[in-house]
Image: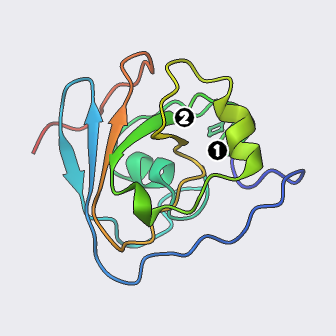
Amino acid sequence: MGGQNPFLKSAAAKLPTKPYEITFLPLGRRITVRPEELPYSRDGQKGSILEIALGHGIEVDHACGGVCACSTCHVIVQSGGESLPPASDDEEDQLDNAPGLTAKSRLACQAVPDGSCDVVVEIPSWNRNLVREEPH
Ligand code: FES
């Protein structure tokens, strides 16, 4: 499944206009990528943290296909959160069901960096993701 949830109104996110880096911290590893050539996939909003991760071989659980209907894509934005739009009410509702919620928690499928700064994203250890690519 992928695309958009037809039952939710999602505002078009502002896409980056300049290069930026996003660093993923899965399972104690550190992988930095420079998002280009969007879209990478049909999962999550265009330019979302989920889409970027999947496009770079970094698995993030996304049971609903990235349509804001679960909380399995829960990530913690350690820095650069100011480049993300505020979470919608629908995102907040789903996050309420996520384990280990923090003030910096976001749904990876809904959070779209605008490229105004670099972003560091922790993929929580309870999210049983596996990284498919080797470290750089
Ligand atoms: S994948 Fe279901 S809410 Fe993000």
Viewport quadrant of the C terminus: top left
Answer whether residue 1 is visible to the viewer in this image: no
The residue under the point 71% across, 54% down is 3
2 and 1 marks in contact (CB < 8 Å): yes
Q: Is mark 2 within 8 Å of ligand 1?
A: yes
Crowd rating for badge 2 (residues with CA inside 10 Å; few <14, some 14–19, many 20+): many
Q: Residue furthest right?
A: 7
Real-space CA distance between mark 2 and mark 1, rounded to the nearest whole angstrom: 8 Å
Residue 19 placement, left or right of 82: left
Residue 66 placement, left or right of 79: right
- Nearest the camera: 104 or 12? 104
- Label 2 amino acid? Cys
- Please provide percent x and percent y for residue 127: 45, 21
Q: Residue furthest bottom?
A: 17
Crowd rating for badge 1 (residues with CA inside 10 Å; few <14, some 14–19, many 20+): many
Residue that badge 1 annotates? 66
Question: Would you identify the image quadrant in which residue 104 lies?
Answer: top left
The residue under the point 40% across, 24% down is 129
Q: Is mark 1 within 8 Å of ligand 1?
A: yes
- Label 1 amino acid? Gly
Residue 71 placement, left or right of 83: right
